[in-house]
Image (spheres, coloured by chain):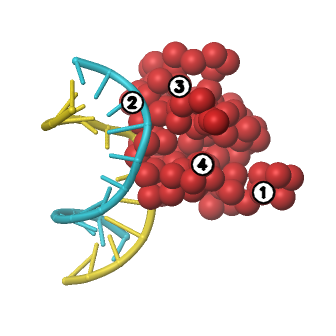
Chain colours: A red, B yellow, C cyan
DNA sequence: GAGGTGACTGCGA
DNA sequence: CTCGCAGCCACCT
């Protein structure tokens, strides 16, 4: 019944990420049930720049808190700029206190599910 | 219809 | 700590 594409589901979860928080591709993948296919999440973000409303892809990083997809932004350095604008510290393309700012949808959303 | 790609993750050394 | 290898699945050509 879910006529929605995998992309749309990823976009929805990403848009639910609270400001000042970040999450990982694997967390979203697990929440969507596609656990193990974290690549699909990142791949979905490939079209995040073409969907509406805009998707805060800058809040989505890899497991290490590294801005792996920053090069997909326009310009790439904008990703870090957006994160810092939300109060998130970024050092060497890495999120500081990533573990503290980590937002897991499979946990946070499950409480209000 | 088939093949290739990839903004990842986990484990072993 | 870092480096390398294999698995995973939806979308694109």
Q: Of marks 1 and 3, which one's residue comes earlier in the chain? A: 3
Give the number of the mark in front: 4 or 3: 4
Q: Of marks 2 and 3, which one's residue comes earlier in the chain? A: 3
Q: Chain of mark 3?
A: A
Labels 1 and 4 in the same subunit? yes
Q: Chain of mark 1?
A: A
Mark 4 crowdedness (10 Å alpha carbons): few <14, some 14-19, many ≥20: some
| Residue A94 seen by the camera | no
Quarter of the view holding residue A107: bottom right
For disc 3, the marked residue is A48
Mark 1 lies on a secondary structure that is loop
For disc 1, the marked residue is A110
Q: Of marks 4 and 2, which one's residue comes earlier in the chain? A: 4
- Tell me whether circle 1 and circle 4 mark residues in contact (CB < 8 Å): no
Q: Of marks 1 and 2, which one's residue comes earlier in the chain? A: 2
Quarter of the view holding residue A81: top right
Task: Specify the quadrant that holds the N terminus of chain A.
Answer: top right
Residue A6 image position (x, y, % from top left): 53, 36
- Tell me whether circle 4 and circle 3 mark residues in contact (CB < 8 Å): no
Q: Chain of mark 4?
A: A
> How far is disc 2 from disc 3 in space, using C-alphas?
13 Å
For disc 4, the marked residue is A32
For disc 2, the marked residue is A71
Mark 2 lies on a secondary structure that is helix
The front one of A86 and A91 is A86
> How far is disc 1 from disc 2 in space, using C-alphas?
32 Å
Looking at the image, which residue is at 76% across and 41% down?
A18
Give the number of the mark in front: 1 or 3: 1
Residue A50 image position (x, y, % from top left): 52, 16
Give the number of the mark in front: 2 or 3: 3
Q: Of marks 1 and 4, which one's residue comes earlier in the chain? A: 4
């Amino acid at each position: 019944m879910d006529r929605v594409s995998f992309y749309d589901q990823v976009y929805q979860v990403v848009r639910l990420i609270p400001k000042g928080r970040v999450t990982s591709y694997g967390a979203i993948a697990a929440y969507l049930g596609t656990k193990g296919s974290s690549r699909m999440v990142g791949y979905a973000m490939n079209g995040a720049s073409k969907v509406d409303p805009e998707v805060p892809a800058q809040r989505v990083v890899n497991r290490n808190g590294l801005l792996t997809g920053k090069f997909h932004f326009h310009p790439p350095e904008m990703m870090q700029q957006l994160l810092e604008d939300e109060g998130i510290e970024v050092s060497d393309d890495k999120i500081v206190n990533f573990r503290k700012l980590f937002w897991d949808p499979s946990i946070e959303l499950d409480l209000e599910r």
